[in-house]
Image (cartoon, helix red, strand yellow):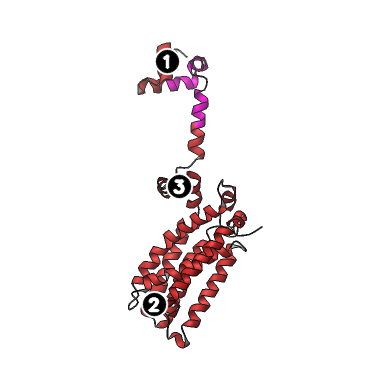
């Protein structure tokens, strides 16, 4: 080396007050000059390099929160719970795409077909949220199951948060589809009562068995109920959601909520799987 960084320039570089040209020149020189690096080490505060390295590791290892996570945090959800919500399948593109396609198919069937299409809509619409709940937690469906079980929060709270996420992403699509069915103005909202009952029944039953088995049982029961009360040739396709039946679904939902609340501790293994 024919020259070295003078003391004043080195002090400016350490303090961060050097201009861009001087700073770049100093950096290039420090790469090749061990003597100036030794002088630099004397001027650098003892913990500066440790703090800088810690900052680098945090930036590299901690990904930037997604838009949904940031929105959830603004609504009062903690950072760790926002991450657990974001990992739920209800926010994943495949689930959203499958839900949209299914809703479009059953809405088209109800619009262009005979009463069979309407029965198909009434069978599928209330059960789509149930399918989302089945994918929301438990080792047989949740890709983030291990992280979820290690989260410092009760299983019941996490399950309810993910259920809300499912409902937020699913219900609006089906409500809109219901408004498109001609001659069935009330269809857009009347299916919400049995859907609420089906979701809460799935959650309550999952305190005894896995959530996937609970969801399957609820789906079978609802499908059999809709088809059987529709009558021969599906002459009365909307009997299952007739106004006199709506209060019974609400009563069932309340009972299931009570059961879930009292047995919520059984969800410590998520879905009753030991």
Outermost residue, bottom side: 232
Q: Position of residue 68 (x, y in %)?
A: 42, 50
Helix, strand, or loop for circle 1?
Answer: helix
Helix, strand, or loop for circle 3?
Answer: loop
Q: Residue at x 53, y 78 (%)?
A: 224
The numbered mark, 3 or 1, whose residue comes first in the sequence reads 1
Q: Nearer the viewer, mark 2 or mark 1?
A: 2
| Quadrant of res 105 | bottom left
Q: Position of residue 230 (x, y in %)?
A: 46, 83
Checking the image for residue 77, the label placed there is 3
Q: How far, Cα to Cα, is label 3 from label 2?
A: 39 Å
Checking the image for residue 11, the label placed there is 1
Q: Which residue is mark 2?
A: 110
Magenta region: which residues?
26-54
Q: How far, Cα to Cα, is label 2 from label 1?
A: 77 Å
Do the residues under discs 3 and 1 have CB atoms within 8 angstroms?
Answer: no
Q: Residue at x 43, y 19 (%)?
A: 14
Q: Position of residue 245 (x, y in %)?
A: 45, 76
Residue 268 seen in render: yes
Q: Is residue 136 above or below residue 243?
A: above
Checking the image for residue 212, the label placed there is none
Q: Position of residue 80 (x, y in %)?
A: 50, 45
Predominant SS of the magenta segment: helix
Residue 130 seen in render: no
């Amino acid at each position: 080396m024919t020259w070295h960084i003078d003391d004043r320039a080195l002090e400016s570089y350490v303090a961060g007050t050097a201009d861009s040209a001087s700073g770049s020149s100093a950096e290039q020189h420090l790469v090749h000059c061990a003597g100036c690096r030794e002088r630099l080490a004397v001027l650098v505060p003892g913990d500066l390099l440790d703090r800088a390295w810690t900052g680098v590791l945090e930036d590299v290892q901690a990904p930037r929160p997604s838009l949904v996570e940031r929105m959830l945090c603004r609504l009062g959800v903690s950072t760790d719970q926002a991450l657990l919500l974001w990992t739920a399948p209800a926010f994943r593109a495949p689930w959203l795409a499958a839900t949209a396609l299914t809703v479009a198919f059953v809405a088209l069937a109800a619009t262009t077909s005979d009463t069979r299409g309407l029965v198909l809509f009434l069978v599928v619409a209330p059960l789509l949220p149930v399918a989302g709940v089945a994918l929301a937690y438990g080792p047989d469906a949740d890709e983030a199951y291990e992280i979820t079980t290690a989260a410092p929060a009760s299983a019941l709270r996490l399950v309810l948060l993910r259920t809300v996420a499912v409902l937020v992403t699913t219900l609006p699509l089906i409500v809109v589809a219901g408004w498109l069915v001609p001659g069935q103005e009330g269809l857009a909202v009347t299916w919400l009562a049995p859907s609420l009952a089906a979701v809460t029944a799935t959650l309550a039953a999952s305190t005894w068995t896995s959530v996937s088995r609970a969801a399957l049982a609820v789906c079978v029961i609802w499908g059999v109920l809709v088809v059987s009360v529709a009558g021969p040739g599906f002459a009365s396709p909307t009997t299952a959601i007739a106004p006199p039946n709506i209060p019974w679904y609400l009563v069932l939902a309340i009972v299931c909520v009570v059961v879930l609340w009292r047995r919520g501790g059984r969800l410590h293994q998520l879905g009753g799987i030991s």
